[in-house]
Amino acid sequence: MSSTVTQALEKDGACAESNTPLIALKDWDGPGDPGNPKNWSFGTKVYATAVPALFAFVVTFGTSVYSAGLEQLMQQFHISQTVAILGISLYSMGIAFGPMVGAPISEAFGRKTVYLTTMPLSMLFMMGCGLAQNARTLLVCRFLTSTFGAPAVAVGAGTVSDIWELHHGGGLASMLFIMSPFVGSSLGPLVGGYTLETRGDWRWLMWVMILVAGPIWVMSFFFGETSKKELLRRRAHERGLPVPPKPPALVALKMLFVITLFRPIRMLFVEPIVMSISIYVSFAFGVLFAFFVAYPNVLGNVYGFSLGQTGLAFIAIIIGVILAGVTFAILDKTFYAKAKARAPAGKTPPPEERLYTSMLGSLGIPVGLFWYVFEICRMRFVPMDIDV
C-alpha cells in the first residue's frame, strides 16, 4: 500500500474498513464484489440486457417502417422514387456515424448516460420527420434520428459483456442482442403497412416510432451503470481515493479521434479478419435493406398485395432470424464445445471456432436470392417467401 493512499484513507477514517484500497481503483474488491455487474441477480441481468436489445430493436425498426410510406411521400413532395428511398439510405448512414457520437459520452460518463441522453435527441428528430413540410427537412431529420439513436446500439454490446460471462449465459445473451435489430427491421414494414391502412397518413409512421421508443427510453432509468471504468471511478470518489486526472482537452480529443475513427479504419484495411467480416456483414445487411424496397414493389405491383399484406410477408425474415439463432445454438453446443474440450487448460478456443454459422449462412444467401428471382418470374408467392 502506497503512503499516498494510506494517508487518504486515514484522513477519511476508512483504513480499518478496507484492506485493499488500492485495488478499488484498478479492479473489483474480489470475485464476489456486489458492485460488479456480473454478480447481479439473474432478473437484474435479464432486465439490463433487455433494455439495450430493445434500443437496437427500435433503431432498426425506424429503418424499415419508413418504407411503407414511399408512395405517399413521392406524391406529396413531388419527388422521384430514388429521392424517397434516400430516407432509408441516409438513416442507414446515420447508424454508421452514431458510434462516433456515443463513444466520447460513454468514455467520460459511462454507458447508461448514452442511453439517457442520445435517445431523447433521436426522438426529437423523429418528431421533426413527422412535422416535415418538404423532402429536404425529412431527409435531414431522418439522418439525425439514426445518428443519435445508433449510440444506444453501439454501447449495447458493451453492456451485455459487462453483465455476462461469455461461458455462463453470455453466448445466449449476445445472440439475443444480435437478433433484436433484425427483428426490428423485419417488423417495421408490417407495422407501417397496417398503420397506413388504418390512419392513411405517412406521418403516423413517425409517431409510431416515438410511441415505441418512448417507453423503452423510460425503462433505461431503472437499471444501473455497467461500465467497470465508471463504477470504479465512482467508488474511488466515495472512498476518498485519488481519481486519475483527466488529460487536457486537446489530448483527450486526439485520443478520441484515434480510438473511435482512425484506429478502426486502420484495422479495416490491415487486419484481414476485420476486413472479411466487415464485408460479409455489410453485404448481409445490404441484402436485408434491399428487401424493404424490393418486396413491396414485387408484392404490390406483381401480386396485388395491400400494404398490410406486404408487411405480413416480412414475417418470413423473422422466422429466418429465429432459425439462424437456433442453428447458432446447435453449432455452439457441438463444434465449439468440442473445440473448448480440446483447448489447453485455462485457455479458450480461437474466435474462428464460432464462424461455422456464418460459413453456413454464406451459402444460403446466394441460393435464396436466386430462388427469389426465379419464383418472381414463375409468379409463385409461397416459394418466394420461403427463400426470403
Image: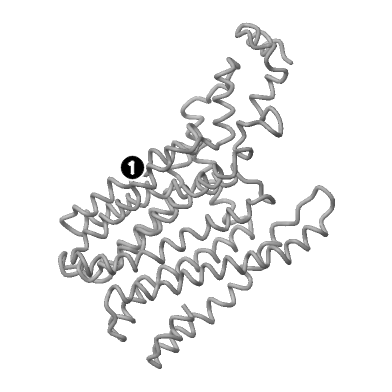
Say which of 180 and 349 sits in front: 180
Give the residue displayed 62% in from the left and 73% down from the top.
Answer: 360
Observer able to see residue 175: yes
* Count of numbered marks: 1
Q: Quadrant of the N terminus?
A: top right
Q: Position of residue 63 (x, y in %)?
A: 36, 60
Give the camera-side residue of 204 and 131: 204
Query: Which residue sits at x=59%, y=52%?
Result: 267
Q: Position of residue 343 (x, y in %)?
A: 81, 56
Residue 231, compared with residue 378, is above or below; it is: above
State the image quarter where residue 163 is shown: top right
Secondary structure category for the residue under label 1: helix
Identify the residue under disc 1: 120
* Residue at the image point whose x is 22% and y is 54% from the top: 130
Q: Measured along the vertical axis of the image, is residue 160 above or below residue 6? A: below
Q: Nearer the viewer, residue 340 or 105?
A: 340
Q: Is residue 232 left or right of residue 353?
A: left
Q: Is residue 284 left or right of residue 125?
A: right
Nearer to the camera, 40 or 358: 40
Judge whether 46 appears above or below 86 on screen.
Answer: above
Residue 240 position by quadrant: top right
In the image, taking residue 130 as reference, residue 313 lies left or right, namely right
Q: Residue at x 69, y 57 (%)?
A: 351
Residue 83 appears in the picture as rendered: no
Q: Position of residue 140 (x, y in %)?
A: 27, 53
**159 left or right, relative to 213:** right
